[in-house]
Amino acid sequence: MRPSFSFPYVLSSWKVFLTQRAQSTQRRKTPTRENGARGIRREKITAIRCQSSAAPSKGRHRRGSRCVPRSRGGLDGKRRSSGVKPLLQEEQSCLCYAFCMTAKILDGLKIRDEIFAELKIEVAQLAAQGVRPGLAAVLVGENPASQMYVKSKVAACEQLGMASWLHTPPANATTEYMLQLVDDLNRDDHVDGILVQLPLPGQIDSKRVLEAVSPAKDVDGFHPVSMGMLVSNRPGLVACTPAGCMEILRRNKVTVEGANAVVLGRSDIVGKPMALLLLHANATVTICHSKSRELPEIIRRADILVAAIGRAGFVQADWIKAGAAVIDVGTNKVSEAGEAERLLKNFPARLEKFRAKGSVLIGDVHPDAVSTAGALTPVPGGVGPMTITMLMSNTVKAAKQRRGVRK
Ligand code: GUN
């Protein structure tokens, strides 16, 4: 008797075949990620069902397939089981099985703790020689975000046993007032580092004020002399956020030499110094920005991506090369419900927190990038803590250089 093949029968057989093939391939090969950025831990690839409406994929992770990120410690901080978990209910799912990858989380808080422990020892050794590194912070006006940052910087000094002074000129302070204050701090021998918190109110000429800071005390690395030292790859004080990004790469053993590095953003504070640091570490560097043509294509070539463009979730998950190391410098406060829901669709725990709090911090990279990148800094808890950490490190460095301490 001839067997009859109904359409539902063929469909379900096809599904069973795909499931078994995916499972047996996994058993046979225990496939591992081909890392774009060498040096990143190789990750096991897990077969999961994805919600792409396209034809079944050929056993590979498909760009743009929207797989639920199932990390061992995901960006929303929740540990998830390592078991295979279907994304959609059975009746909703398509036939496509994708190999979904989960990025290694590049934990800035952990690195901060490591560096703080090292600095504490160094500060104690300096104290034994009669040297106490000190930071003078200048906060103009009452910008709440700046107040919070400066408070954290002063608290970090205390934590490490360093001296700190906080100067709080009023919001209507003039350029002349600021120049006088900076001059006083330049002359004060107890002060090793001067930090003028940005942004300054519009009536103050920020460039003139930053240029007035003695290069020897320029712990922010914003002075043209500091920038020039960096351009010519000489030892000096380097801007804290890019220096922190390099520490994240270094301490996670991400190979920079020979890598294609893309820096998205061209600010004096982050983009430009970041590109120079990567270049000096022998990466092939591309700087791009909001006006660059074909951004997705440029970013797709990156083994290392540093995103510093200041737009929440700007870099889409499918712009990222599989296995790339992604450093997300953005810290964007999102308060609009529609935007938060769109960005956190796959992160129910974070969405829940947003609903309770009314706002959420989102990086420049879309949170779904956790399923395409090989390694990724979380927001918050990635680059953010590194900026203060490197400020502390620069203050200790300035103290040693200025006071002629060798070690
Ligand atoms: N405002 C935002 N970031 C920074 C920084 O790194 N240093 C200073 N001084 N101001 C900032």
Image (cartoon, rainbow, N blue to C red):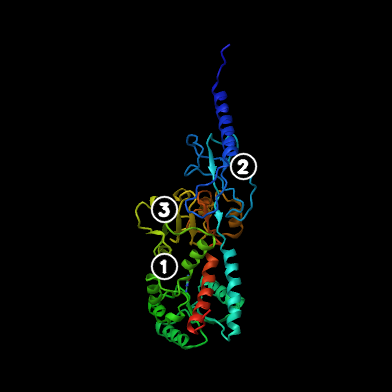
- At label 1, counting other C-alpha atoms closer than 10 Å, the crowd grade (few under 14, some 14-19, many 20 or more) is many
Q: CA distance from mark 1 to mark 2?
A: 42 Å
Is the C-beta separation of discs 2 and 3 under 8 Å? no
Q: Position of residue 140 (x, y in %)?
A: 48, 78
Residue at mark 2: 85
Where 357 sits versus 36, above or below?
below
- At label 2, counting other C-alpha atoms closer than 10 Å, the crowd grade (few under 14, some 14-19, many 20 or more) is few
Q: Position of residue 2 (x, y in %)?
A: 56, 13
Q: Amino acid at mark 1?
A: Pro
Sequence-wise, the earlier of marks 1 and 2 is 2
Q: CA distance from mark 3 to mark 1?
A: 19 Å
Q: Amino acid at mark 3?
A: Ile
Q: CA distance from mark 2 to mark 3?
A: 30 Å
Where 69 sits versus 255, above or below?
above
Secondary element at tag 2: loop
Residue at mark 1: 273
Secondary element at tag 3: helix
Residue at mark 3: 299
Q: Is mark 1 within 8 Å of ligand 1?
A: no
Secondary element at tag 1: helix
Where 327 sits versus 87, above or below?
below
Q: Residue at x 45, y 85 (%)?
A: 186
